[in-house]
């Protein structure tokens, strides 16, 4: 089955950490550029972090220095390590592949005390 499935969302206090995982199946993961996006209530979906097939990363300004994207091609998995979380990081986080373009179902991250 061709799909992306995210794991790892939840409720965390401000300043806390979470690690999201996205497992791909049915695609050639190693050739894919992968991205993590988020959508907060009432907002458009925005790119949070991306990683190319060669391991080059890019980040939204709002998460630089706090989030880290990585990939494990042997496990067909892309990760998003989120540290120093803020309430404004709250939203549904989605992963996306490029070849083919696929989206996961999303995982909810809530940052609140």
Image: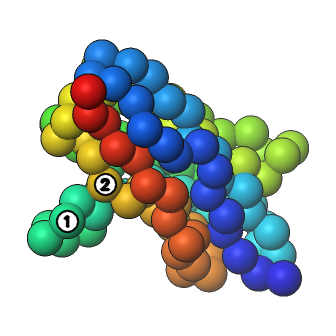
Which residue shows up at 55% across the image and 72% down it?
A: 105
Query: Which picture quadrant has residue 5?
Result: bottom right
Residue on which disc 1 sits: 41
Q: In this view, does 94 lie above or below 71?
A: below
Q: Residue 64 carries which label?
A: none
Q: Earlier in the sequence, mark 1 or mark 2?
A: 1
Left or right for 63, reference 53: left
Counting the numbered discs, the total is: 2
Which residue shows up at 28% across the image and 46% down it?
A: 90
Considering every residue shown, the one lying at the far front of the view is 113
Residue nearer the viewer, 15 or 2: 15
Image location (x, y in percent) of residue 13: 33, 24
Image location (x, y in percent) of residue 63: 25, 33
Mark 1 in CB contact with mark 2 (< 8 angstroms):
yes
Residue 30 seen anywhere in this rendered image of the structure: no
Image location (x, y in percent) of residue 92: 38, 59
Residue on which disc 2 sits: 91
Residue 4 seen anywhere in this rendered image of the structure: yes
Distance, label 1 to label 2, CA atoms, is 7 Å
Query: Which picture quadrant has residue 98?
Result: bottom right
Quadrant of the frame with the N terminus: bottom right
Which residue shows up at 25% across the image and 41% down it?
A: 89
Left or right for 42, reference 69: left
Residue nearer the viewer, 71 or 110: 110
Left or right for 74, reference 43: right
Q: Is residue 78 above or below residue 14?
A: below
Task: Assess disc 1: are there few (<14), some (14-19) or many (≥20) residues with their C-alpha within 10 Å of its C-alpha.
Answer: few
Dot 1 lies on which element?
loop
Image location (x, y in percent) of residue 50: 43, 49
Which residue shows up at 77% across the image and 81% down it?
A: 2
């Amino acid at each position: 089955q061709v799909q992306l499935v995210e794991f790892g969302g939840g409720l965390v206090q401000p300043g806390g950490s979470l690690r999201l995982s996205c497992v791909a199946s049915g695609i050639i993961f190693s050739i894919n550029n992968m991205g993590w996006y988020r959508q907060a209530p009432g907002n458009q979906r925005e790119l949070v972090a991306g990683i190319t097939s060669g391991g080059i990363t890019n980040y939204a300004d709002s998460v630089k220095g706090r989030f880290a994207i990585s990939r494990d091609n042997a496990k067909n998995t892309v990760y998003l390590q989120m540290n120093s979380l803020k309430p404004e990081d709250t939203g549904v986080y989605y992963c996306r592949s490029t070849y083919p373009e696929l989206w996961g179902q999303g995982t909810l991250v809530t940052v609140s005390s």
